[in-house]
Image (cartoon, rainbow, N blue to C red):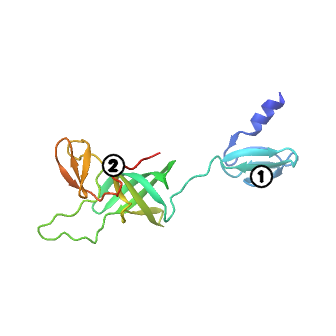
Amino acid sequence: MSNRFLIMEKLKAVAPGDKLAVIEEFSPSEGTYVNGSLIRALKLGVARYNQRKKEIKIEPLKKIKIPMVGDIIIGQIESIQSNIANVKIHYINNEKISNNFNGMLILKPEIQIKRGKEKKIFCKLGDIIRAKVTSYNNAIIHLSINGNENGVIYTRCSSCGGNVIRIDGRVKCIECGLVEERKLAFDFGKAKLK
């Protein structure tokens, strides 16, 4: 077995509980634990063997980006029920994420329907929105589209699926002419995603 093969073998990804070495060969370090005479991985990552110090540590494969209070997210409306929209988060602070996070957007329940006036539509299924993370309670990411910078940044006609243009805080389909209410971000139709 060549030295090159040994080095490659020592850099493999490990999962919690994987055997790394025996305590006679190496000392445990960050991300490891001793089980009898074995050193095992405590977390998912890459095992790093320091031959000089005779020490093993586990380094994370990559840091997971989690939406935190105050972060700005970009996501897509996946479902709407009454005054709540479920948002699949794709970007956190303009960085694309590979993890699956969902947020809950409260659609202004305090706005009452006045006689003769329809309820304002803030967003619809499939819309791409920019929102701010306002809280993280009971494992639910709460979102808000308050502010000029937040709101719908991309949508299509909910009737025919055609392209739309902005007209005074509303959108108009350039194909069928349908005009719809939305809470639009200041850069609706111009926002760029990486």
- Percent across and percent down for residue 69 are 49, 65
The residue at 25%/70% (across/down) is 111
Say which of 28 and 110 sits in front.
110
The residue at 67%/51% (across/down) is 43
Q: Which mark is residue 189?
A: 2
Task: Classify mark 1: helix, strand or loop.
Answer: strand
User: Would you say 154 lies left or right of 96 here?
Assistant: left
Q: How many angstroms separate mark 2 from mark 1 (CA)?
A: 57 Å
The residue at 33%/49% (across/down) is 189
Name the amino acid type tagged 2. Gly
Find disc 1 in the rendering and name its residue: 35
Q: Earlier in the sequence, mark 2 or mark 1?
A: 1
- Marks 2,1: beta carbons within 8 A: no
- Percent across and percent down for residue 147 are 37, 65
Q: Residues within 10 Å of mark 1 (few under 14, many from 20)?
A: few
The residue at 77%/39% (across/down) is 10
**Furthest residue toward left:** 116
Q: Nearer the viewer, mark 2 or mark 1?
A: 2
- Percent across and percent down for residue 91 are 47, 51
Examine the rendered structure and indicate whether residue 25 appears above or below residue 168.
Answer: above
User: Would you say 77 lies left or right of 135 here?
Assistant: left
Q: Residues within 10 Å of mark 2 (few under 14, many from 20)?
A: some
Q: Which mark is residue 183?
A: none
User: Would you say 142 lies left or right of 183 here?
Assistant: right
Say which of 71 and 135 sits in front.
71
Name the amino acid type tagged 1. Asn
**Quarter location, residue 46:** top right
Give the total of numbered labels.
2
Say which of 129 and 104 sits in front.
129
